[in-house]
Image (tube, grey):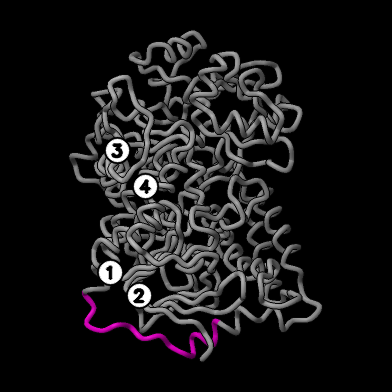
Amino acid sequence: MSDTERHQYDVIVVGAGGAGLRAAIAAHDAGARTAVICKSLLGKAHTVMAEGGIAAAMGNLWPEDNWKVHFRDTMRGGKLLNHWRMAELHAKEAPERVWELEQWGALFDRTADGLISQRDFGGHRYARLAHVGDRTGLEMIRTLQQRTVALGIDVFMECTITHLLKDGGAMSGAFGYWRETGRFIVFEAPSVVLATGGIGKSWKVTSNSWEYTGDGHALALRAGAGLINMEFVQFHPTGMVWPPSVRGILVTESVRGDGGVLKNSDGERFMFNYIPEFFKAETADTIEEADRWYEDKKNNRRPPELLPRDEVARAINSEIKAGRGSPHGGVFLDIASRRTPEYIQKRLPSMYHQFKELAQVDITKDPMEIGPTCHYVMGGVEVDPDSAQSTVPGLFAAGEVAGGMHGANRLGGNSLGDLLVFGKRAGEHAATYASGLAARPAVDEAELERASEENLAPFDNEDGENPYTVHQELQQVMQNLVGIIRNEEELSSAIKEIDSLRHRIANLTVEGHRQYNPGWNLAIDLRNMLLVSEAVAKAAFERKESRGGHTRDDFPMTDYAYWGKRNLICELSSTGEVGTREQSLPEPPPELAELLEEGH
């Protein structure tokens, strides 16, 4: 390993989305020598796909909104499986993080009074999403990226981390390679912050791009950390379904928040048929009531299109399966009949151009064809709510790779607040941890040799498996057997198929050399995708109820007495297989429990 590139830092952040950049800024500001490592280019992060806004109870449109209402909405949207402390911290600190972004140069839309504008989103009692048109995530990344560069934080682009390094039981750094050259690189650091995002590339239809292969989830598992809530995968209700080249690309919830309605092939506004009892007190029961809500929101009777995402996705899925879908296998999202072209182009400029350029559809005149797309995983690394540290000393996680905050289902807009609140906390505590060590942990040279050999193994195999074939088979298994609706027979089959694929990747073959080699890159990513897919399938098999992003048609009811009080933790066994164990749900203190019970 003498020719391997080496660097030393106090804190390294793996991932350069909103969580990673906010963590890096916080670590730097706390005095730590910090580096950001990103698999793609700086600014190429899925944070930009969070188009609708940042959920924060600022009270700019509704003075009666406050952190307690936001806390309750988050817990209720997560079907009460959220870690109460994470939901509390997020609700309390999100407004400050938004104002901080504004101080750093973010240009938010304004109200007539000059305050930051806030819009409606599914599951939120009040309009509380601070936004920049429908490009909020892009503005967040622009702002955080600009500040990261201005502070002089080192950034390593197109660099993939494949192994976390440990000294005894604690972090000592990370090992990876440059995607362009294939050359290996070692980062020696006592604190590692994972901010790698999600796992969507294990499914065939997804809003996620090629980077989302579950790297951080798998790295944490192999390092000895646990994953929580992995059975809960969010299928965003509205992804593009036509043409095939753009299938799965996200259609922001802002379209529904600004008046768009869902219709089937019969022209019926079908969401009225799917209002669950749990939400009837707050949701309009008729088209007339819903229309009045759009014009006069003081009555708080929300249109059914703004139910939480899991409810809307299941309703769309049911309409398609019943034969009332659109010509290309989705349903229709119509805002053209409800808003003027000027309003649509002003409020939804990205959506207007996206459909115009990619699908040749003018959304100011015609409805969009949309359908559910694998979008977000609520599950992730189990972390301490206050510090964002995992059970492995020196290993932190924030953003989509961390679990607990969203419970069984994430409310739209909560992801960007989550990135900011816990990204900052992860960076600060990672810096504190590193500065408090008596001595820097050592990097084991033998461990580096093993990591190198494992990464290069596909070049040594002849006549083995094609990584692209294995990836396609995995995506088909997850799409068909671990999708929106699940059952024991299909999940059992999925677990067997994943186990078979896991054995097959030991014999992957790639050709050529290490310089930018997509086949080799995929072969490495497949190890992570299969491990995380195994965790999702096994957790889904064990949770014998339907809740949030996990629906079992053989267990259609929500079990409040047993599963409502338990989380599932996925851990890696000594044989390399994923196992699950139950963990009691932490109970909120009486004053927060009272908020949930009284419905504030």
Identify the mark nearer the N-term, 3 or 4.
3
Q: Within 10 Å of the Cα at label 3, are there few (<14), some (14-19), or many (20+) other Cα atoms?
A: many
Q: Residue at x 57, y 66 (%)?
A: 528
Q: Are marks 2 and 4 in contact (CB under 8 Å)?
A: no
SS under mark 2: loop
Q: Which residue is mark 2?
A: 9
Numbered badge on residue 219: none
Q: CA distance from mark 1 to mark 4?
A: 23 Å
- Look at the picture and state if 555 lies above or below 278: below
Residue 440 among magenta residues = yes
Q: Are marks 1 and 4 in contact (CB under 8 Å)?
A: no
- The total of numbered circles placed on residues is 4
Range of residues picked out in magenta: 436-451
Q: Within 10 Å of the Cα at label 2, are there few (<14), some (14-19), or many (20+) other Cα atoms?
A: some
Q: Which residue is mark 1?
A: 32
Q: Amino acid at mark 3?
A: Phe
